[in-house]
Every structure is written in C-alpha cells, then in structure tokens.
Amino acid sequence: MDAPPDPAAVFACAKSLHDACVQHAEVEPGLNLSESYHGMDGFMRELMRVAEEFEMWACRHVVFDELDEVWPYLLEDRFGAACLEIMEADALAGFDADDCLRIAFKLRLPIRVDASLPLPLCVEASNPTAGAEFQRLRIQTVRREWKEEGGVAAFTEDDDPFDENYSTPRCAIYGVAEGGLEYIAERKTYAEARALLTKLLPGIGFPEEVVAFARPVSPGGGVDGLG
C-alpha cells in the first residue's frame, strides 16, 4: 500500500531546491531565475510542482522502513543538490517521473523492485542441493550496448537508468562457483527469474520482494541483497 504524501517532505523538497537554485544563480553568469520562470512567483510554483511530484513518486516506490534518516530532513539536506546534478536550474519545467528515479539513484533511496522501474539488483541465495557445483545462485541486472557487437554489462547503482546507449535492463541468472560466475539464463523481471530458479531448485531462498539500494544484509543470512 502506498504511503500518504507528507506535507513536511514536500516543503523540504521545495526549500532544498529553492536554496540550491538561488546559490547556483549567484555564481552562474547569465542565469536569472525570475526571467527563466516569468517571475519569482512562477519559480516558486515550479518548485512546488517538482516537490509534489517527487513526493508522490516516492510514496509509490520508496521503502521508508529501510531509511536510516528522517525523510523530510534527508530531503532538505540533499534533494536540491541531487536535482541540479541531473538538470539545469532553469529547466525545472521539464522535470518528470524519469527524473524522480534519477534523483532516487543519486540519493541511494531504497526502492521496491517491480517490473515498472529499471532498478539495479544483485541478489544471491544458497543452493539447497548438497554437493552441487554451484553453491550459490545469483540474479543480477544486466543490459546490452546498442552499438554494433555491443557486449553485456552489469547494470549497477552507479549507472544512468535511462542511458540511451543501452537496452532496458533484464535479470540474468548466474551460478556462483569458486572460479567465478557462469551464465545460466535470462528473464525480463526479477519475479520471472525467481520463478524459474524456484522450479529448478525447490527450496532456494530467493525472497518474493527485494529492495534496490537496501541496507546490506549481515553475513550468515540466507539471502544477500547486494544491489
């Protein structure tokens, strides 16, 4: 169930972005926020639109229980700077849902993995079959370069989720052995990859739901969330 929007979080986003834009305008020759937004009232309306859109997006996708910080304080401290890493201060009118995800990457927010978002994922589980060559199995996001003879690359938390040089991320299944990884299969989503492994290896401990940018799982657990 989606969390309800928090007015304090909306205010924190707007304030953080306002301060970041004003500071940027002070050192950027030619940047006039009033002119860019047809008046400072237009600038303020744009700030509120961005803040409200991001908070609504976060309520659908962020796993707040995974946060170590108070949500509005985190946003007040870091949202504005993260936003200006992905777009110019005079271009807020173009802010959309894709930018919400880009900011979530910048802030390393814990995001519930589903088929609607390109999210980095690397999860391992122990093989329940005693004596198997692969003691562990891995589900990891990968993508292909569009250029001719482009190779396959891991899709990680340091990548742009909408990089036009690559295909949409998919979930690859690997066996983990002492000599490294061995490719087994590939599926479109985590749920499909998990379903295949569950059929092949009943009892394998991949969870139904996983979180990208989750806190590291302590050693000794059945599943390691490495995304």
Image (cartoon, grey):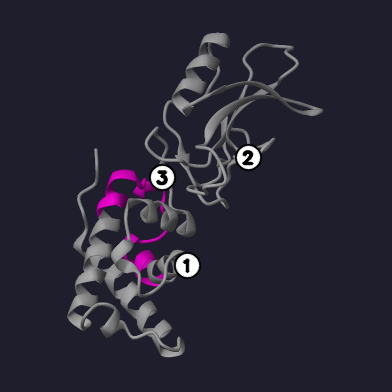
Quadrant of the image for the N terminus?
top left
Looking at the rendering, the stretch of residues picked out in magenta corresponds to: 56-77
Cα gap from disc 1 to disc 3, whole angstroms: 20 Å
Quarter of image, res 35: bottom left
Q: Is residue 222 visible?
A: no
- Badge 1 is on which residue? 85
* Amino acid type, mark 2: Ala
Residue at horizontal 57 percent and vertical 10 percent from the top? 200
Left or right of residue 133: residue 33: left
Residue at horizontal 41 percent and vertical 71 percent from the top? 88
Left or right of residue 42: residue 129: right
Residue at horizontal 24 percent and vertical 46 percent from the top? 3
* Amino acid type, mark 3: Ile
Mark 1 neighbour class, 10 Å CA radius: few under 14, some 14 to 19, many 20 or more: few
Residue 27 vertical position relative to residue 140 in the rendered view, above or below: below
Label 3 element class: strand
Label 1 element class: helix
Residue 154 is marked as 2
Quarter of image, res 166: top right
Label 2 element class: strand
Cα gap from disc 2 to disc 1, whole angstroms: 23 Å
Quadrant of the image for the C terminus?
top right
Cα gap from disc 2 to disc 3, whole angstroms: 19 Å
- Badge 3 is on which residue? 111
Q: Main secondary structure of the magenta part?
A: helix
* Amino acid type, mark 1: Glu
Q: Is residue 43 visible?
A: yes
Q: Is residue 88 a member of the stretch shown in magenta?
A: no
Circle nearer the N terminus (2, 3):
3
Q: Residue furthest right?
A: 179
Front residue (pair 168, 178): 168
